[in-house]
Image (cartoon, rainbow, N blue to C red):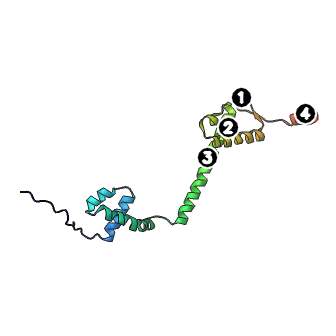
Amino acid sequence: MKTKKEHWLKKSYQKATLETKLLVVDQILNGQVSTNFAAKKYDVPRTTISYWLRKYSTLVQQNTGMSKNDELKKLKEKIEELEFVKDFQQDIIAGMELITGVDMSKKSLPKSLAKEIELKKKNRLKQNGSMDVLGLVNKPSTKDLKHNKNNK
């Protein structure tokens, strides 16, 4: 004869130590285990683990993480680095477009970046003069400049 499972009785759990709680929270935050797996592994209800996550996640992050000022500083440095890389790449694209005569940026980049590259090309042409098909710079010579002044 089968006995019915008495579902109204609460399951008793062993009290977890602070180290265990922090270990579980750290593993979940690092993506090593899921909440469900941790509940089965450590024999703790999922709701309890959710409570631990809310309560101890900031504590774990404070112990292992960096301060907000340090994080902001690091992010600002990363932004500066990425802006430098973007400018460098735009200079290369502008140079290639001037050499080849093909507007690659208009076809494949967002409008805002294509406009920035177009401005870089115009500035480069103002500084260097015009370019011929082979990419050689045709700077106006002093003789040409004098001739243009005399004609005006």
Q: Secondary structure at mark 3?
A: helix
Q: Secondary structure at mark 1?
A: loop
Return the disc, 2 or 4, that comes first in the chain's sequence: 2
Q: CA distance from mark 2 to mark 4?
A: 29 Å
Tell me if residue 99 comes above or below residue 1 in the rendering: above
Q: Secondary structure at mark 2?
A: helix
User: Is residue 5 rendered to the left or right of residue 149?
Assistant: left
Residue drawn where x is 60% and y is 39% of the image: 109
Q: Amino acid at mark 1?
A: Val
Q: CA distance from mark 4 to mark 1?
A: 25 Å
Residue 6: assigned label: none
Residue 38 sits in quarter: bottom left
Residue drawn where x is 31% and y is 61% of the image: 46
**Tag 4 residue:** 147
**Tag 2 residue:** 95
**Tag 3 residue:** 86
Seen from the viewer's position, the closer of residues 2 and 27 is: 2
User: Is residue 70 rendered to the left or right of residue 22?
Assistant: right
Residue 55 percent across, percent down from the top left = 39, 68
Return the disc, 4 or 3, that comes first in the chain's sequence: 3
**Tag 1 residue:** 133
Q: Secondary structure at mark 4?
A: helix
Q: CA distance from mark 4 to mark 3?
A: 40 Å
Seen from the viewer's position, the closer of residues 4 and 104 is: 4
Tell me if residue 8 comes above or below residue 81 in the rendering: below
Seen from the viewer's position, the closer of residues 149 and 2 is: 2
Q: Nearer the viewer, mark 3 or mark 1?
A: 3
Whether pointer 3 and pointer 1 mark residues with C-beta atoms closer than 8 Å, the reply is no
Whether pointer 1 and pointer 2 mark residues with C-beta atoms closer than 8 Å, the reply is no
All told, the count of numbered labels is 4
